Amino acid sequence: MTTSTNNTHNAEQQRIQAQSDGAAAWRLWGPYLSERQWGTVREDYSAHGEAWDYFSHGHARSRAYRWGEDGIAGISDSQQRLCLGLALWNGHDPILKERLFGLTNGEGNHGEDVKEQYYYLDATPSHSYLKMLYKYPQQAFPYQRLVEENRKRGKDQPEFELMDTGVFNDNRYFDVFVEYAKADADDLLMLITVHNRGAADAPLHILPQLWFRNTWSWGYDARRPNLSVIDNRPGMQAIAVQHPTLGDYHCYCDGDPELLFCDNDTNRRRFYGSQDDGFYKDAFHDYVIHGNRHAVNPQQTGTKAAAHYPFLLPAQGKVEVCLRLSKAPLQQPFKDFEAVFSARRGEADVFYANQQRNMDDSDAKMIQRQAFAGMIWSKQFYYYDIPQWLNGDPGQPEPPQGRRQGRNKNWLHLNNAEIILMPDKWEYPWYASWDLAFHCVTMAIIDPAFAKQQLLLMTRVWYQHPNGQIPAYEWAFDDVNPPVHAWAAWEVYKTECKANGGVGDLDFLERTMHKLIVNFTWWVNRKDADDKNVFQGGFLGLDNIGVFDRSAPLPTGGYINQADGTSWMAMYSLNLMRIALELALHNKTYEDIATKFFEHFLYIAKAMTHIGDEGIGLWNHEDGFFYDVLRFPNGQMMPLKIRSMVGLIPLCAVEIIEPEMLERLPDFKYRLEWFLNYRPDLADLVSRWNEPGRGNRHLLSLLRGHRMKLLLRRMLDESEFLSDYGGRSLSRAHHNHPYVFDCCGQPLTVKYQPAESGIFGGNSNWRGPIWFPVNYLLITSLRRFSTYYGEDFKIECPTGWKVSVNQCRGRRAVTAPDPNLPQKRARAQAGIRQQ
């Protein structure tokens, strides 16, 4: 089910609908190439998991990848059998510019970092139109200088960026725009437009590249696909594409480029000293840069091809290169080239105009549209078969035995080969399940069908572990991510309902819920050490700001009862309860399930205040804040009084039950009333069930009004969590008052360090001092509270101002005089707009 509003003259929306209905495969081709395949876990066959070192950027041009491909402005089919991307050479670089360069985790003074200038400018969900910009220096790309300068710098110094090298001085660079437009689902047009921004003529070699992912070298299927010349008439060159499963295509190159051919195979001469005469993956590098005419196949056939366009671009001038990749043979492939691009650009404008019809700010529209483009361009074909990776391939040397006891050894069921939204196709070119949940909430605005498919993917049997765990990310699938999948599913469902006039996809909710119940059970069985409804999630993918690495054995022994891990589970309970209630409106069976999660939420809420019978909880009455609690091996417990984002997560566990819902679900209502009468301690602890809020709504939350005010006073205090740009990951109070823990005679310290990071313990706010996803959750939770409490519930924002909580979203009514009020108001409002 997809959006149907204002569909009549919206060609892009019709394409999305056709894809969803199975009428046309508009997503067969898309921007599915990674920006970095080297340095990934999949390509790592070392004995000790040294992924960054085993397959380096310096090797990438000459070694065949096993599991995927990378490229600049690249597209491929949905199984990445055939790839199309861009290569460049400015006449000075030591290597052909085929992929984006960056520093490894050990080279960057702040970790891994891409060192290029590129921008995703526009995209439509069906990929009928795509546009990006790459800025290419006219001087030699400063590879070595970037490495050496960053190596000299410590973490207290800024990163040394490409802009800092001076290679863009005096506008001595090329703006390389790459656009794609689809004439049909299997008919793609590529337009490369290059502007010389400098004041002097400059050489540039443009090489659009077409190649097959190497599937023939690993011992499973030796069939080689083939590229070969079929037409070399003046004004147009053409390449025949033959693949055993993709079928036949035709690639047309406008003008009179030189067609070059080689094979997407490892250069055995470079790595193994072979004396053979093969035409290897790096042949175009040798041919164009070193003039080695023997590097390419003179028979003009192979598994990798390029159209070589050498130019001398005049100062302030531009050139265009046109290609077309089509399933059907075309007699005049460039006759309608401009018309197709013009139509697709116009249709993209219509699509986004409809999406943004309720937005008035033109800047906001532009920002949102480019943000959507960034998400669409971040789709990637992700291929990873754990048994094959662990055991090795019959056509290759056996992997070291040590890898069988290394990372991901427990995920033998995992076999991924799908298009997935990436957190980032260079720095994080692998899926992260909880990042994906946030992405899907956004993607649902423009393509709910794809968002739903992505959420369902993580619960399929070839992803979700048989024990119920959802995979975290390839660096360590065993890591635990916060359980936000149910939240995302509900948000996506609501977004689609709104677009469809209140009609939602119940089948999607039902499929998702069945698998998430298994995942919820995994949490209960695996992450609640004492069966007391207090959880020890571990690292959780969060900022992990604490004195310990929460994923590793503690030097004190024992374990940490987590305020955030327990709050995530309370939120999870409410999310599953809400989904069950929606399903129960159509199938009464789900009333029992809704009741189960309602009661489980109450048990968790109780445990957060009283862990068992020890009289200690995660809520600290003295400080009015939630803290992690360290449990020593002898059973003693101690709160770790670090005021971090960990203590704000309880705000996210909130749900409102409408009175109409209770009337329509009498069995659920009866059980709730019975349980709350039977356990008044739970009802009183969590919410004033018998005191309904605005509109007779009932609130389920970990925080009653008093506790929430105490917590919000800290969150909205500029000397603690509130900054101009959102909530800080760590309270600024720790700047002058660091938290110190005496661990076996050794002091472990957490101190506020704005914009700085560490890894796993200490001030490890490696997600950043201000983290957007959690800020988003906090804002949406505050809106839920506002729906319940109405205008009467007020708190100062920032702390020290007398402002209602509703007015914190931009409408301020300050009653206390303040001579600096105009500056504070402007700064605070700018910060809220940033969020």
Image (tube, grey):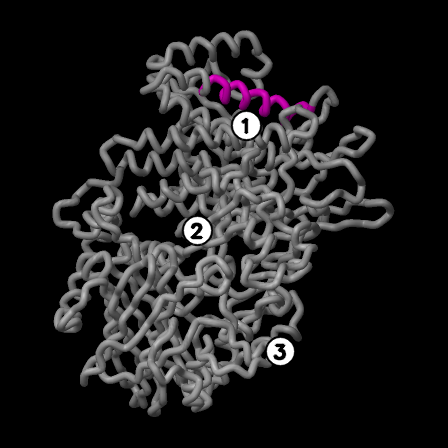
Most foreground residue, 533 or 286: 286
Q: Earlier in the sequence, mark 1 or mark 2?
A: 2
First to last magenta residue range: 594-611
Q: Which residue is mark 2?
A: 417
Q: Is residue 831 left or right of residue 472?
A: left
Residue pictured at 44% horizontal, 30% vertical: 785
Amino acid type for the residue under numbered disc 3: Glu
Q: Position of residue 148 (x, y in %)?
A: 62, 78
Amino acid type for the residue under numbered disc 2: Ala
Label 3: element kind: helix
Q: Which residue is mark 1?
A: 703
Check if mark 1's residue and mark 3's residue have beta carbons within 8 Å.
no
Q: Earlier in the sequence, mark 1 or mark 3?
A: 3
Label 2: element kind: strand
Marks 1 and 3, how far apart at CA: 51 Å
Is residue 602 part of the magenta span, yes or no?
Answer: yes
Amino acid type for the residue under numbered disc 1: Leu
Q: Which residue is mark 3?
A: 148
Marks 2 and 3, how far apart at CA: 37 Å
Q: Position of residue 482 (x, y in %)?
A: 54, 40
